[in-house]
Amino acid sequence: MINRHKLAALCAVSALALVTAACSKTTDEPKTSSEAPAAAPPTPASGTADADMQAVLDKLASLGGKPVEGLSPQDARLQPTPADAVKALMAEKGIAADTTVATQDVTYPTAGGVQKARVYKPAGVAANAPVVLYIHGGGWVIADIEVYDSSPRALAKATGAIVVSIEYRHAPEAKFPAAHDDANAAYQWVVANAGKWGGDAKKIALVGESAGGNMAVNVAIAARDKGWSAPLAVVAVYPVADSSMATGSKVTHAAAKPLNTPMLAWFFTHTLSNPAQATDPRLNLVGADLKNLPPTTIILAEIDPLHDDGVNLADKLKAAGVTTDVKEYAGVTHEFFGMGPVVADAKDAETYAAGKLKAAFGM
């Protein structure tokens, strides 16, 4: 009988086979037409989750969700999320949700129509406060600003800044680069409207998680190339940055939870209009021109297929002369950021990110 780790590894091999052509490594030497891109057989996830992280994973498993990579995008969006698991644990432990940060739901215009956004204002926010544009994760396919409510809320409280969390078009209904275009539109909208919320349009930073981390870096690149007002800092939390499906962590942590390598392959399959888009530097950030970007902080989780995406991006940023800080948290998984009420390392990561933002703002 095959054990669950071997089964997960086999599933990863199958998923990788489906998207190898789309997501083969493109960072250094181009492959000739005679080369057949291949990924090493993945192994079960290494690393041991800390007790508080494991409690979240156990709670998530108890909610009965189905593997996302085997579902349609529509059904995948209905599955329980890590945020649901955190809320359940908070209820069990009697931990009250934070109510000190006020929110206002608004909309912003994009080429694809109006999108939702949520403005977070901490108690006692100062006049002309700095502003953070926050971009949520979900592989460009699932999740929304409701699922990712805790991170911008925590950042607003920890920084004293106004945080604006944006929604954007999702694949496959709107394929790449729709979400990236929306993020760029959101940045221009935030710059233009910061004053309406009591913010300072000259003090804006970018924060994103996972796919959102990818887009945060892309917005900074767009601002540089298009001559927009430049952000003062970028914080990318376990960003999607290397479209290779054969990086070390995508092999080692192929069977990790809540994000595994088959899910990453599934996200790319639904996001791309054609396989060639995998080489686009907006997706494959390690192949982008990264010069003259603002100081960038990259936060990583040990037990995460995207771990090496962040490492590789940090190396490329440093080589491009960008001030780059990297902090890895052992014993935690993808999605840990924002779990501060129940995961100690998440609270520390939120505080660390807030410290980097405050330093950039001169606070």
Image (spheres, rainbow, N blue to C red):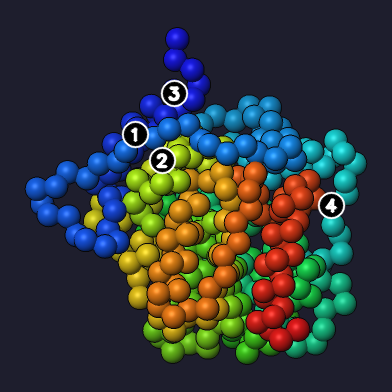
First reached walking from the N terminus: tag 2 or tag 1: 1
Residue of label 2 = 251
Kindly identify the residue that appears in the image at 44 percent across and 56 percent down: 309
Question: Depth-wise, is mark 3 or mark 4 nearer the camera?
Answer: 3
Residue of label 1 = 41
Of helix, strand and loop, which one carries label 1?
loop
Mark 4 → mark 1, Cα distance in angstroms? 43 Å
Of helix, strand and loop, which one carries label 4?
loop
Q: Which of the 4 quarters of the picture holds residue 122?
A: bottom right
First reached walking from the N terminus: tag 3 or tag 4: 3
If the image is split into quadrants, where does the C terminus sit?
A: bottom right
Asked if residue 172 is positioned above or below residue 111 in the image, the reply reads above
Q: Can residue 311 be seen in this view?
A: yes
Q: What residue type is labelled 1?
A: Pro
Q: Which of the 4 quarters of the picture holds residue 94?
A: top right
Q: What residue type is labelled 3?
A: Lys
Mark 2 → mark 3, Cα distance in angstroms? 13 Å
Q: Position of residue 65 (x, y in %)?
A: 59, 30
Of helix, strand and loop, which one carries label 2?
helix
Residue of label 3 = 6
Q: What residue type is labelled 4?
A: Ala
Kindly identify the residue that appears in the image at 62 percent across and 81 percent down: 204
Mark 2 near mark 1, Cβ–Cβ under 8 Å?
Answer: yes
